[in-house]
Image: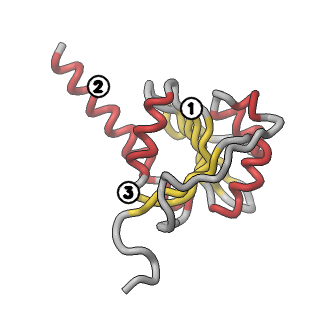
Amino acid sequence: MAEQRVRGASRRRLVVVAGLAALPVIAGCGGEGDASRSSAVSAAPAAEVVAPAKVEVIAGLTGCEAKIRIEADELRQGVCRTKKADWLITTFPEEKYKETWLDSARVYGGTHLVGPRWVLSARPELLGAFRDRLGGTVRRLQGVGPAPGSS
């Protein structure tokens, strides 16, 4: 029994680490700001459909068909690839898993669109259009180390 709990905890850590590994590539480096800075929640027309939704629903609302990368008890994650850009959609069965994921993502920094039990990670210039469709809050997470341009 205890061995199963240890394996479960190790699996959860592995899922979170795997999900976070793609953040610097997909979301870009955005070491400015912190998680406490966020823009106001948008009341987008599709927001009621998205809250909470599957990766596939959010992907469809952003104009892509997501390829599922992670399928686990704690999260589902899909990647969208288009000619313009790539973005990552992560959904969670409970809000507490989303908050844990965001806490872990602080290490990488970046800007994310955050909704009820979902996070969309993309280049900051894409998040405004996605927010208009999905609702949510734009959050900037503080990276580790010195800010770009500091001496």
Q: Residue furthest right?
A: 45
Choose top left, top right, bottom left or bottom right for residue 37. bottom right
C-alpha distance separating marks 2 and 3: 23 Å
Quick one: quadrant of the C terminus?
bottom left
Q: Is residue 53 above or below residue 146?
A: above
Choose between 143 and 85: the one closer to the eye. 143
Question: Which residue in the structure is indicated by mark 2?
Answer: 8
Report the residue that reaches farthest toward the left.
2
Residue at image coords 43%, 41%:
101
Residue found farthest to the top: 1
Q: Residues at badges 1 and 3 in contact (C-beta under 8 Å)? A: no
To which residue does mark 1 refer?
117
Q: Is residue 148 above or below residue 123?
A: below
Q: Which mark is residue 25?
A: none
Q: Quadrant of the N terminus?
A: top left
Secondary structure state at the residue bearing disc 3: loop
Residue at the image point whose x is 44% and y is 30% from the top: 96
Is residue 118 visible to the viewer in this orientation of the structure?
A: yes
Residue 127's spot in the image, x, y percent? 69, 55
Give the label, 2 or 3, closer to the camera.
3
For the point 49% across and 25% down, the residue is 94
Residue for badge 3:
107
Residue type pointed to by label 3: Val
Mark 2 is on which residue type?
Gly
Q: Secondary structure at mark 1?
A: loop
Q: Which residue type carries mark 1? A: Arg
Instruction: Give the distance between the C-alpha atoms of the residues marked 2 and 1, in whole angstroms.
Output: 21 Å
